[in-house]
Image (tube, helix red, strand yellow):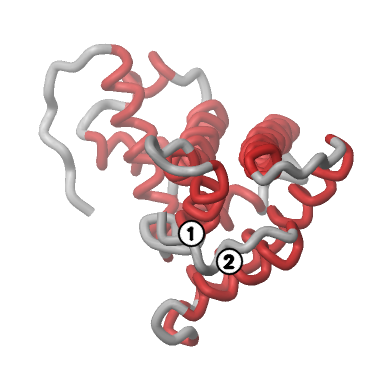
Amino acid sequence: MSRKPFRRASDAERRADLIDAMLDCIAEGGIQNATVREVAERAGVSGGLIRHYFATKEQLLHAAYRHTMVAMTEISAEAGMADGKSAQAKFAGFVSACLMPPMIDARRLSLWAAFIAMARIDPAMGAIHRESYLEYRGLIERLLAGAYEEAGRSVAPVVVRRLAIEVNAVLDGLWLEGSLAGDLFEGQELLKAGLHSVGSITGLRLDHIEG
């Protein structure tokens, strides 16, 4: 573990540093390793300074979980909002981003697994999970609705919602396996499987789109 040298920083920067330090501790040794002392040591600050920004360790954990989920959503959302592409290509880009680095990542999986284990026993963590899930599913719904509209297909919102639930489940499963044991998949096998599966669910051809 390396200790960061102390530096003057704004409140936002200091909070970000503490969240990063918390995430590093969790990634390396699990939540049990992420004590206030360890986080302070890694961030190069005192425990008292941590309490200035986060009244409890739990508050810092909640902030770290939200940061993790926001970052994951942003990776896929950025691909789904690429300029100069058709709505169907944006949807295909979103699916692809879910199944490639930096989304497919062992460290990211370790963090997610550590946090998700707390979601059922910590109401605040559970609320963050629900909020993140609904935001991600909503993104899928918007991209899917746009692809259907572009294709001239009239699909009821209730159907788009159901399909988004199915797409999310497939992407979650493939992301989990890709991050846990990526060496089991050859070349772009995981990506192709995702595009084919999502295409089968939605009735959209995604595995032939170049951009």
Q: Earlier in the sequence, mark 1 or mark 2?
A: 1
- Percent x, y for residue 138? 69, 35
Q: Can residue 104 be seen in this view?
A: no
- Percent x, y for residue 116? 64, 50
Q: Mark 1 points at which residue?
A: 96
- The answer to whether the residue labelled 1 contacts the one labelled 2, judged by CB atoms less than 8 Å apart, is yes
| In the foreground, 131 or 151 | 151
| Other residues around mark 1 within 10 Å, as few (<14) / some (14–19) / many (≥20) | many
- Seen at 72% across and 42% down, the residue is 152
* Quadrant housing the N terminus: bottom left
Q: Is residue 24 visible?
A: yes
For residue 171, side relative to residue 200 (left or right): left
Q: In this view, does 176 lie above or below 143?
A: below
Q: What element carries label 2?
A: helix
Q: Name the residue under label 2.
A: 195
The quarter of the picture where residue 100 lies is: bottom left
- Seen at 57% across and 73% down, the residue is 177
- Seen at 77% across and 45% down, the residue is 120
Q: Rounded to the nearest whole Å, what is the CA distance between mark 1 and mark 2? A: 7 Å
Which amino acid, mark 2?
A: Leu
| Other residues around mark 2 within 10 Å, as few (<14) / some (14–19) / many (≥20) | many
- Seen at 79% across and 51% down, the residue is 163
Which amino acid, mark 1?
A: Ser
| In the foreground, 207 or 5 | 207
For residue 57, side relative to residue 43 (left or right): right
* Quadrant housing the C terminus: bottom left
The quarter of the picture where residue 134 lies is: top right
